[in-house]
Image (cartoon, rainbow, N blue to C red):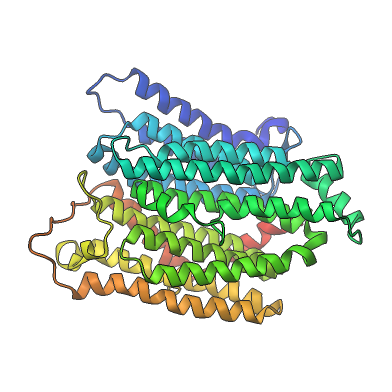
Amino acid sequence: MFNSSFDAVVPMLCVVLAALASMGAEAFRAKDEEMPIGGLGIVGLAGAGISSGLLWNRNAASFGVLVADNFALFVTLTLVIVGILTIMFSSQVLRRDQLPKGEYYALLLFSLVGMIMMAMANDLLIVFIALETLSLSVYVLTGIRRDDPKATEAAFKYFLLGAFSSAFFLYGIAFTYGLTGTTRLDQVGAYLAAQSMSDNPLILVALGLLLVGFAFKISAVPFHMWTPDAYEGAPAIVSGFMSTGVKAAAFAAFARVFLSSFEPFSADWAPIVWILAALTMILGTVVGVAQSNLKRMLAYSSIAHGGYLLVGLVAANQVGKAAILFYLLAYAVTNLAAFGVIALLSSREKETDELRDFAGLWHTHPALAALMTVCLLSLGGLPPTVGFIGKWYIFSAAVSAGYYGLAVIGVLTSVISVFFYLRVVVMMYMADRDASAPVPSQVTGLGMVALAASIVAIIYLGILPTPVLDLAAESIATIF
């Protein structure tokens, strides 16, 4: 058993130790010595997963500002899955591109520490610290190919706009503290509940500033500008990690702050989030149709999926709350696998990220074409994949809460999005490959294992989603 005062930090501590071990291994290995540094990360993340399971239903707390309730633990387990899959996909990529393994894995793990902390934070200042911890690591990961001008530009844009959004969030914290005298989310919630009939405009100012800060991190329109450039410029596997891990952590904090502390003022923020959700779904889908670069297409797809998650936040009923967590897990596995295929097929000289690069993939890499097809069908929300189940529950939540217009927009944009996903499928199976085009890299080892595991999860959760949905409903109920 853990010491009760440190229970909540055990999952984070496992990942921190793995990150430090990765740095040490890189520092002390001989120049040409091969060390399984990624294995250290997998061990640390496995420890975080096991400790999260042991903490289930214990509602542990540490230092008064970190809470390992079931909601935080569900998100932590999702992040553990994201981290392990990312490391497995990264093994071949790092070896091929000769990137510094110790630095890469340490940054990856430290960003996961920030994500887990964000999910567990019960204090706005801790949310901010976690946000900066994960953001600084991801900025560097985005530009880790230092000889690539596109990667450097992407990292710089991401850094500038990330700093801009952090300023909004920090001002929101300052206004909240000025109003309530605390940054503790439970105490803020108690104060606002007592002020629920108040017309104090400063409450709305604080709420608006926090909303802008979160909207930047989840790539909600009109705060999405950094997303396509950052995803296109970063290595494909880093783009996949950003699109899943950062979104899961940001939505976890978003849900905890707005569905718990600021819930008494939901009548004020729900219409704004309704508009954000509608705009995000529409723009992400419409602009995504025009993309020929797969990384940019998946970036706009990520924006649209953020809109679907906002629908669950607006609905805020039991179905919607559970659907948020389930959708985060479904989207994380599916999108990371899609980016993993792009990363594994690429070469050191050129990434396989243009639509024409996938022409005739069925003939050269039939297994990868089949796996990519499943991922794209799941992102499009077609049965029997987990993407269909996730969207079904999100839209059902909107209908049961009376948001019929939002549900209609969601269904229509989802149908339109199928076009750009199926366009890739058609290219893989029905287009002839250019004879002069280089053959994509062969994929072996951990990468194929990670892809196979992802596809099994996508199909399994699409056919038998009930246990995970029940777990999600039980988990999110702990923050209300």
Image mark count: 0
User: In the image, what residue occupies the spot 41% across and 52% down?
Assistant: 229
Residues 234 and 121: in front is: 234
Residue 267 in percent (x, y) is at 79, 67
User: In the image, what residue occupies the spot 63% across and 50% down?
Assistant: 213
Q: Is there any visible trace of residue 450 in the rendered image?
A: yes
Quarter of the picture containing the N terminus is: top right
Residue 299 in percent (x, y) is at 42, 59
Residue 269 in percent (x, y) is at 74, 63
Q: Is there any visible trace of residue 51 in the rendered image?
A: no
Residue 15 in percent (x, y) is at 51, 35
The image quarter containing residue 255 is bottom right
Q: Is residue 145 left or right of residue 335?
A: left
Residue 9 against residue 223 in the figure, above or below: above
User: In the image, what residue occupies the spot 38% across and 59% down?
Assistant: 296
Residue 81 against residue 139 in the figure, above or below: below
Q: Is residue 199 left or right of residue 405?
A: right
Residue 306 against residue 246 in the figure, above or below: below
Quarter of the picture containing the C terminus is: bottom right
The image quarter containing residue 127 is top right
Give the residue at the far left of this rendering: 435
Residues 20 and 244: in front is: 244
Residues 90 and 355: in front is: 355
